[in-house]
Image: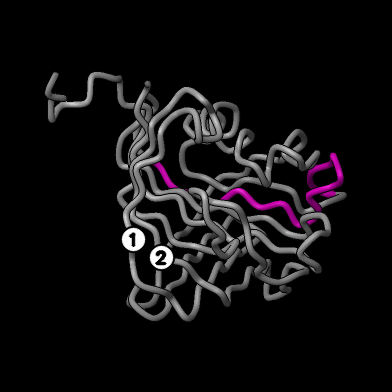
Amino acid sequence: MTRSPIHPGAVAWTGENPGIYLKDTQDGPWTGLATFFRITWSPYGRGCGVLLLDQPNVEKGLPEVQNFLISDNEKLARYLVSDFFSKFASFRVSPGIKAITYLPLTAARRDGDAVSSYAEIVASKDLEVVMRWNKLGAPYAVDMPPEKGPTQRHEMYSLFLDSPEASVTVNGKPLKGKVMQRDFADTKKPTAFLAFSESWMEA
């Protein structure tokens, strides 16, 4: 039977979701996690922001620990955390995801050509996060089936560019750690990457 070009599942969301995940050693715990999102459609409307865990292994938020999420659409942000980000391999094992502080976004901009380098800059009242990806590789497309994906419920399509050299700063202070390797799509990929044209479909 020929598959229809129109996916039969409901659209969960579509947009961008690049990430930078850091460790001190390949086999060690995560020392810093950040994922940016710019959603063009979801059941909760559009929005952008950044989820950041400065201390992923500490189940606390602001002001004790800089584990927070800045966004211009809190309902969308909470949906992404509960149904998607908290199921991603790096965040799923990090207690900090359970105690993040939600903050309103005051400014957001991007920089770079997305060919060799790229950056997302997001600010709230007292915090500015800069995520920067360098030495970008060639783009490649991914069609992730539900059984191999983090939610086990969604098929994911996306365009990826890997970044072996990346950084995250909060008010100019860098998160600890560096880019390592991760298991992804039956291969090894850097823990820093751009993810554009990303769509999650109900299986």
* Residue 55 part of the magenta segment: yes
| Kind of residue at badge 1 | Tyr
Q: Quadrant of residue 109?
A: bottom left
Please name the residue shown 54% across and 62% down the image: 189
Q: Secondary structure at mark 1?
A: strand
Per the model, the C-alpha gap separating discs 1 and 2 is 7 Å
Q: Left of 177 or right of it: where is 130?
A: left
Stretch of the chain drawn in magenta: 47-63
Task: Out of 58 and 93, give the one closest to the viewer.
Answer: 93
Q: Nearer the viewer, residue 166 or 98?
A: 166
Q: For residue 140, which numbered disc appears in the image? A: 1
The residue tagged 2 is: 161
Judge from the rendering whether residue 62 lies leftward or rightward of residue 188; answer left or right.
right
Say what secondary structure mark 2 lies in: strand
Q: Are marks 1 and 2 in contact (CB under 8 Å)?
A: yes
Label 1 vs 2, first from the N-terminus: 1
How far from the left and from the top, in percent, is residue 183? 60, 52
